């Protein structure tokens, strides 16, 4: 399956244009938005222009900090579990937005049962603790429960954003962690996102410049 993932768009027209241009040229099956679109109209306009399957979660900067109810806006969620049929089989995708349910780990574990973890993708706005979460001030701003979730559930891929200066990807045990922030710490565009190819040979990630 081929995915295009991006977070922290912050109402940037240049980022939107970069996304749409890449989706026109790449053979993508799924777009994943990792939060912080900032304005509702910006998000809704982008969704109308993206014609492939979409899975988007909320960020802490969204819609004047008034977090929408889960699923009240089409394609946007605080927490949802998705069964997705792709060309190479079924995937399970979890979206964890800016409002994190207290019992999300058990909920996800019960839902997964004995599902193949090589086709499990977890997406969050905030990064896991100590994994692509190093802020400019030297603090690690990630979520400890997310790191624990990686240890417990061993997803193939964890996508996140929020800490703009920590964009990029790394490997932690069996899991690839990708921070796909599209803007730098001054909210200026630095890239449009990441192209992700998941196959039986593993995960290939390519940074897509604006």
Image (cartoon, helix red, strand yellow):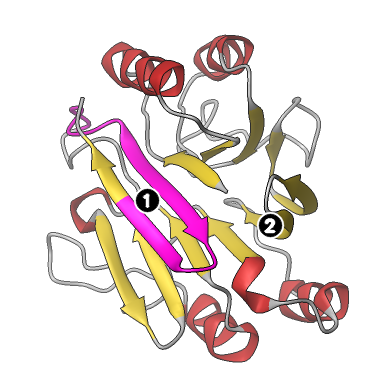
Viewer-side label of 1, 2: 2
156 in relation to 190, above or below: below
184 in relation to 138, above or below: above
Q: Is residue 132 visible?
A: no
124 in relation to 184, above or below: below
Give the mark nearest the N terminus, 1 or 2. Answer: 2
Q: Which mark is residue 93?
A: 2
Q: Which residues fall within the magenta stretch?
A: 187-205
Residue 12 among those drawn in magenta: no
Q: Number of labelled discs?
A: 2
Alpha carbon of mark 1 to alpha carbon of mark 2: how far?
Answer: 19 Å
**Residue 12: image x %, image y %?**
32, 18
Residue at image mark 1: 162
138 in relation to 98, above or below: below
Q: Closest to the observer: 177 or 27?
A: 27
Q: Closest to the observer: 62 or 128?
A: 128
**Residue 17: image x %, image y %?**
34, 12
Q: Secondary structure at mark 1?
A: loop
Residue at horizontal 49 percent and vertical 65 percent from the top: 158
**Residue 22: image x %, image y %?**
37, 23
Q: Closest to the observer: 157 or 28?
A: 28
Q: Is residue 16 visible?
A: yes
Q: Quadrant of residue 193?
A: top left
Residue at horizontal 69 percent and vertical 45 percent from the top: 87
In the image, 199: left or right of 163?
right
Q: Quadrant of residue 76?
A: top right
């Amino acid at each position: 399956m081929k995915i295009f993932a991006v977070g922290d768009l912050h109402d940037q027209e240049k980022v939107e244009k970069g996304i749409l241009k890449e989706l026109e040229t790449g053979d993508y099956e799924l777009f994943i938005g990792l939060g912080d679109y900032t304005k509702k109209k910006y998000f809704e306009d982008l969704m109308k222009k993206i014609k492939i399957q979409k899975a988007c979660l909320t960020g802490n900067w969204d819609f004047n900090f008034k977090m929408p109810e889960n699923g009240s806006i089409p394609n946007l969620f605080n927490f949802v579990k998705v069964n997705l049929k792709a060309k190479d089989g079924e995937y399970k995708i979890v979206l964890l937005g800016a409002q994190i349910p207290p019992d999300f780990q058990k909920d996800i574990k019960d839902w997964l049962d004995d599902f193949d973890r090589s086709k499990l993708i977890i997406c969050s706005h905030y990064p896991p603790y100590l994994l692509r979460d190093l802020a400019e001030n030297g603090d690690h701003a990630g979520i400890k429960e997310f790191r624990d979730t990686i240890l417990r559930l061993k997803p193939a891929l964890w996508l996140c954003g929020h800490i703009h200066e920590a964009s990029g990807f790394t490997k932690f045990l069996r899991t690839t962690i990708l921070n796909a922030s599209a803007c730098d710490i001054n909210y200026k565009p630095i890239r449009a996102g990441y192209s992700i190819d998941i196959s039986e040979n593993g995960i290939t990630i390519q940074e897509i410049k604006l």
